[in-house]
Amino acid sequence: MHIPILYQDPDLLVIDKPAGIPTHASDPADPYPSDALRIVQAQAGLGYLGMHQRLDADTSGVLAFAARREANRGLAAAFEAHAARKVYVALVHGTPRQAEGLIDAAIVRDRGERYRVTSPNDPHGLAAQTRYRVLSTVRSEGFGRAEAGAPRVAAARTMPSATYSLLEISPETGRSHQIRLHLAHIGCPVVGDPLYGPADRPAPRLCLHAQRLTLPHPTTHEPITFTAPTPALFERLTTGLPELALAASGVHVRGLMRFPDALRALLRLAVERRTPLRADPGTSIYRLVNGAADGLLGLTVDRFGEALVVSLYDDDGRLPPQPIPPALVAALAEVTGAQRIYVKYRPKQASRLSDDQMALLTPPQPVYGPDQGEFVAHEGGLTYLIRPGDGLSSGLFSDMRESRGRVRAWAEGRRVLNCFAYTCGFGVAAMAGGAQRVLNLDLAKVALAWGQDNYRANGFEPDAHDFVFGDVFDWLVRLARRDDRFDLVILDPPGFSRTKSRKFAAAQDYGELAVLAARCVAPGGRLLACCNVAELPWRSFRDRLLSSLADAGRPAKVGGVYHEPAIDFPAPPAQEPYLKMVLLDLA
């Protein structure tokens, strides 16, 4: 990823942090740099960055770091003495009763991530003051249910007209969640706030932005001001923000064809969120639209180089499927600049479809632009062969991007077993990380051959003995019997599969799979267990893994917990991430 640097000198570095990126890593042991501090440290080529201020992951804007240890004291003193002045802008629901004012309300920790306002007499309360000023207000026109006879996917609950205001915010104190909680306290919650905003008015982003920061330079002590450009969504206030009403409406993307301007606005907002990925020259594989979380229910879009792969999720099960609306194709081409667009019509259960039915759902030719067949795209500087017209999958699952980076970091000098290898994305990452050996197992010969092509595309000469065709369950038993042990075993099975000899459902059978895999893990080795079944709660998945391994006499400790990348796979409000990955350290 790439983050805009607003200012840099030998002592100070200031960035415009994008929404969706945390300030610092929640797990310091996680080798993948998905936090602003480590991304910028690598980007600027610095051996050190000192953190003295934080922004919530979904808050964008100005963020300052000390660029060397000698500057730490001066920067810390500025923040501790309240000599650093911060100004935010917030897009909120409604409008305050007064055009400007001071919110003086103590704050206390509530439950989970939440805080709440408390009385001044609460001994646990922390004093908090926030000044605000109304910059502008707009009333957005609502819309009702779809007209009689309209497609069912276009129907939605009635969305009444709404008022939005843009506020300038100056916090006098720096409590956690202070601005968000104070604005909700006066009846004007920040748009898109999953903790303090209205549950029935979700939005594609938290509309809070740190616009300006003024502080004395840590060395010269001269005051200096940094400004991060206002997000485009905030500046579109004069349009009435119809995209926000649609994002909260529950309208399927097919129904949005009646609102072309709002559709394009939602697509632009999704593209803006992925700017750090788009600006990374070493990565051209990521998710561009993630369904309801981007306000586009029933639609996902993955970028592979200059091509887009669009997936439509309809609930009618129609065969042949209802074609993708031409207006949606045109809007995607206009907003993204894609040269080719392919479409997949996603069924509820792909394993039950015949080959002829599958062909109807996965047309091999693009719906926009010329067909290029196979081409290359990049992730973390590595090369992968993409075949967007080849069935439901195009060659690489973009939600595993960060964990392929983790495997690359863990692999040096280790023996790696890559189960359910598909096109060997984990195998390529492990080889790039300096693995001693990588054994790839899969039940599809075509996928393994594709994996060997991926090896060659990255300059690795594939050894046919390391690309093994067969049932993973059977091969895990064979490898254990042969006393073949690995330092890292990767499990990334499909949620459900069926072979001639067995069927596998992750929700019921993952414990058994983990026990078989553990028998192939060397003493002191690691097992990376991945599961993409959204219906399986994270705690149940973790507990089932640990109890199954303990019962089998191979107890394990959790070494790390991961999920899909937050920046391009945002989760809808009140939903936990669907992808569960647990790194287990085995004795």
Image: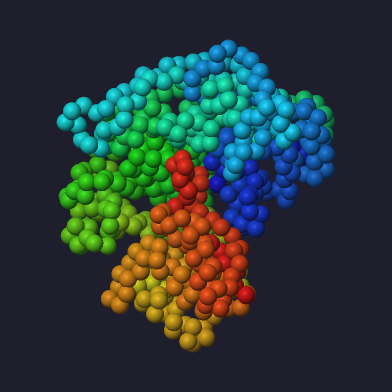
Q: In which quarter of the image is residue 331?
A: top left
| Residue 102 visible in the shown view | yes
Residue in view at x 57 percent, y 21 percent: 186
Q: In this view, does 239 lie to the left or right of 402?
A: left
Q: Where is residue 438 in the image (x, y as percent from the top left)?
A: 50, 73
Q: Position of residue 549 (x, y in %)?
A: 53, 73
Total number of numbered labels?
Answer: 0
Residue in view at x 19 percent, y 31 percent: 150
Q: Where is residue 292 in the image (x, y as percent from the top left)?
A: 39, 40
Q: In this view, does 97 lie to the left or right of 84?
A: left
Location of the C terminus by quadrant is bottom right
Q: Is residue 530 left or right of residue 86?
A: left
Height in image: 489 above or below 62?
Answer: below
Q: Which of 435 and 148 is in front in this view?
A: 148
Q: In which quarter of the image is residue 509?
A: bottom left
Residue in view at x 53 percent, y 23 percent: 188
Q: What coloring was used for the rendering?
A: rainbow
Height in image: 343 above or below 184?
Answer: below
| Residue 434 visible in the shown view | no
Q: Where is residue 116 in the image (x, y as percent from the top left)?
A: 61, 33
Q: Which of 242 and 130 is in front in this view?
A: 130
Residue in view at x 44 percent, y 79 percent: 476
Height in image: 188 above or below 1?
Answer: above
Height in image: 64 above or below 353?
Answer: above
